[in-house]
């Protein structure tokens, strides 16, 4: 297990040309506020994915056979958020135009801005679904407009966004939501229920971009994130929603961000790192999404 490829998939099914899914590690971290380490996320997810079974029992399939290629880490423009966003948009634009499904691994949430900018050059008509504990609607934070805490605010300037799982915001954000009459799906109204799933899906365009901040999950199953927040979604309700979503909508691009592994999750034997299963949960969540995409 020395390859850097997601799932440690054999060459036949991880060749770039033949792969439908492209994993792009983006270890960008500049503005994380509570706990640093999201830059270690992509490597940790890939390492965990190499210990995962590649057969999926729920769909009775081997999702990797659709082709999953892992690109080299993207690291351009990391000294300046606007440069990073532009460079990432340049990097992914060609992938989107060749109809690859790009899954970017963060890194902090700011990478979503580059992904969406790249996609927008190729496709105008999509809506953006954000799963997150935080509203991320501040106009600026700690003197930058490109903080992870401002991601949704930047995205809403040019996109139709739908936020699901929200349970943490400040007064400024609450005022902004009222002023703009935004309809957020708050965690308190959805956790443990299913009636919201079809409602969310019915509001989206046929094509969507999906941004997954892992802190939307409950910290009992996803403690290793930059800014954990109690009261999030559980594993099976998340899977149910994602399966419905992939059935009804065409997903053009995905980012999975804010995993903040502790050193334990990275460099010690499996036996020990199992004590903090966040990275495995993140890897499995991504593989589940691929399973649903391949078996609709
Ligand atoms: Mn968040």
Image (cartoon, grey):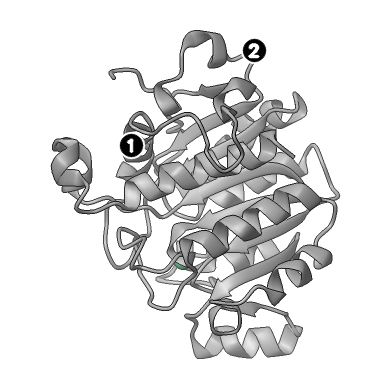
Q: Residue at x 65, y 84 (%)?
A: 176
Where residue 136 appears, as percent x and y from the top left, is 53, 71
Query: Is 167 drawn above or below residue 73 in the view shown?
Result: below
Which secondary structure lies at badge 1? helix
The secondary structure type at the circle numbered 2 is loop
Q: Which corner quadrant of the image does residue 151 belong to?
A: bottom right
| Residue 106 visible at all | no
Q: Nearer the viewer, residue 277 or 104?
A: 277
Label 1 Cα crowd, 10 Å radius (few <14 / some 14-19 / many 20+): many
Q: Residue at x 33, y 31 (%)?
A: 51
- Do the numbered discs 1 and 2 sit on residues whose CB atoms are within 8 Å? no
Side of 127 where 188 appears, left or right: left
Q: Quadrant of the C terminus?
A: top right
The answer to whether 236 is drawn above or below residue 164 in the figure is above
Q: CA distance from mark 1 to mark 2?
A: 25 Å
> Percent position (x, y) of residue 101?
66, 33
Residue tagged 1:
48
- Of callouts 1 and 2, which one flags the residue occurring earlier in the amino acid sequence? 2
Is any atom of residue 57 visible in this view? Answer: yes
Between 137 and 143, the residue placed more toward the observer is: 137
Q: Residue at position x 77%, y 39% from top?
A: 121
Dot 2 crowding, Cα within 10 Å, few <14, some 14–19, many 20+? few
Q: Residue reaching furthest top?
A: 12
Mark nearer the viewer, 1 or 2: 1
* Residue highlighted by disc 2: 17
Residue 204 as seen in the image, left or right of residue 274: right
């Amino acid at each position: 297990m020395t390859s850097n490829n997601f799932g440690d998939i054999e060459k036949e099914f991880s060749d770039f040309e033949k792969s439908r899914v492209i994993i792009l590690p983006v270890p960008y971290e500049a503005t994380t506020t509570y706990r640093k380490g999201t830059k270690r996320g992509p490597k940790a997810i890939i390492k965990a994915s190499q210990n995962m079974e590649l057969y999926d029992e729920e769909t009775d399939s081997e999702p990797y056979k659709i082709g999953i290629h892992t690109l080299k880490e993207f690291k351009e423009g990391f000294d300046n958020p606007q440069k990073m966003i532009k460079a990432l948009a340049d990097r992914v634009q060609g992938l989107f135009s060749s109809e690859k499904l790009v899954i970017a691994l963060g890194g902090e949430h700011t990478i979503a801005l580059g992904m969406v900018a790249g996609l927008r050059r190729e496709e105008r008509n999509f809506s953006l679904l954000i799963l997150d504990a935080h509203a991320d609607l501040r106009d600026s934070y700690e003197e930058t407009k490109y903080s992870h805490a401002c991601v949704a605010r930047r995205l809403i300037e040019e996109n139709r966004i739908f936020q699901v799982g929200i349970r943490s915001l400040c007064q400024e954000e609450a005022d902004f939501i009222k002023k703009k009459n935004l309809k957020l799906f708050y965690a308190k109204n959805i956790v443990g229920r299913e009636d919201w799933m079809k409602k969310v899906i019915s509001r989206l365009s046929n094509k969507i971009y999906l941004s997954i901040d892992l802190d939307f999950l409950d910290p009992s199953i996803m403690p290793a994130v930059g800014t954990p927040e109690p009261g999030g979604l559980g594993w099976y309700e998340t899977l149910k929603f994602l399966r419905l979503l992939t059935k009804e909508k065409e997903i053009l691009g995905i980012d999975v961000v804010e995993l903040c592994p502790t050193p334990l999750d990275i460099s010690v034997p499996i036996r020990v790192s199992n004590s903090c299963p966040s990275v495995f949960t993140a890897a499995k969540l991504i593989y589940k999404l691929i399973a649903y995409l391949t078996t609709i």
